[in-house]
Image: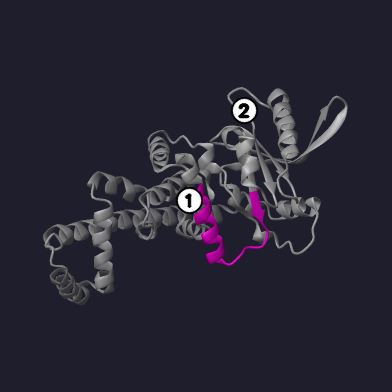
Amino acid sequence: MLPEDKLFQDVKSLVLQARQNAYRAVDSERVLLYWQVGNRIRSEVLQNERAEFGKQVIKNLAERLSIEFGNSYNRYNLWLFVRFAAEFPDLKIVDAARQLFTWTHLRIFLRIEDDLKRRYYMEMCRIEGWGTRQLEERINSMLYERTAISRKPDELIEMELAQLEKSNVVSEDFVFRDPYLLDFLDLKDTYSEKDLETAILVELQRFIIELGSDFAFLARQKRIVIDDEDYKIDLLFFHRRLKRLVAIDLKLHKFRPQDKGQMELYLRWLEKYEMVEGENQPIGLILCAGKAGEHIELLMLDKGNIRVAQYLTELPPREVLQAKLHAAVAKAKARNKA
């Protein structure tokens, strides 16, 4: 590269970085402004219990502000500012949030009615650094409902979220999902386990996105030898935050009890020969075409270091998937309370 070209690239980088810093600073001030506006309206107008009076005041205020400052202060946005102040009443929390998230992030969070669910997405967004498009995709894929954390009693969810907020320690229940959505593999009709594995490797980046951003790919068909017999682990990953090797076994059939024994063998081998100092015990993920809940319960797989999850290579209509996940969450919560 010529000296003039290098100088150009260096200056260009400085300009772009300065612009980005300026944008972040402006957006941070905008978040604070919107909270202050919402808080002022909420405290001075909406504390009056006459709802119609409050609506008329906000309508009139929006008309005047829009003339003065543009459409950012229309009636819909003023109500959004009020909701922002209501959902985040503590200014200290707002100050912390505006250092981490853009106003677009916060608008997306405000669409989530359930407080625990919103906090989950906020924490995972913070931990994994999601952009707004990634955040939308994960909400649309019902990521929260597909994690084990959503199936726990609210008190335990609250405790685990508080621990994550305080210490950045991610538990397995935040990491592993069920089902995994693998429709991007474009597998139709009949296919083999090798076809499934090959398709995953072709779309490895998208597969890792579905797994979670802290997964690092290590090996395909990891060969292990036990008593002169060859075995192969379909896929081997490492999870940075959990500090664990993650063995993934792909099954075209519904989960069978013998699948647990096979995975236990893999995990004991990895623990003996592959673990290094500072790592936690390996964990296994059995990805199946289907599973039966009673098998999982009787084998106590929800309490050990083996996870079983279904994968979907073709997605049902969103409302069907939504109903299925909500039913699974409700059933699991009821079982946990019993």
Instruction: Give the structural element (helix, strand or loop) at label 2.
Output: loop
**Callout in the foreground (1, 2):** 1
Q: Give the range drawn in magenta.
A: 310-331
Residue 192 higher or lower than 218, as above or below: below
Judge from the rendering whether residue 257 lies leftward or rightward of residue 331; answer left or right: right
Q: Mark 1 points at which residue?
A: 330
Between 334 and 224, the one nearer to me in the picture: 334
Which residue is the site of mark 2? 281
| Distance of label 1 from label 2 (alpha carbons) | 31 Å
Going by the numbered disc 2, the residue's amino acid type is Gln
Q: Are marks 1 and 2 in contact (CB under 8 Å)?
A: no
Coordinates of residue 37 in the picture (x, y in percent): 20, 60
The tag earlier along the polypeptide, 1 or 2, is 2
Q: What residue type is labelled 1?
A: Ala
Q: For numbered disc 1, what is the local secondary structure?
A: helix
Mostly what secondary structure, the magenta segment? helix
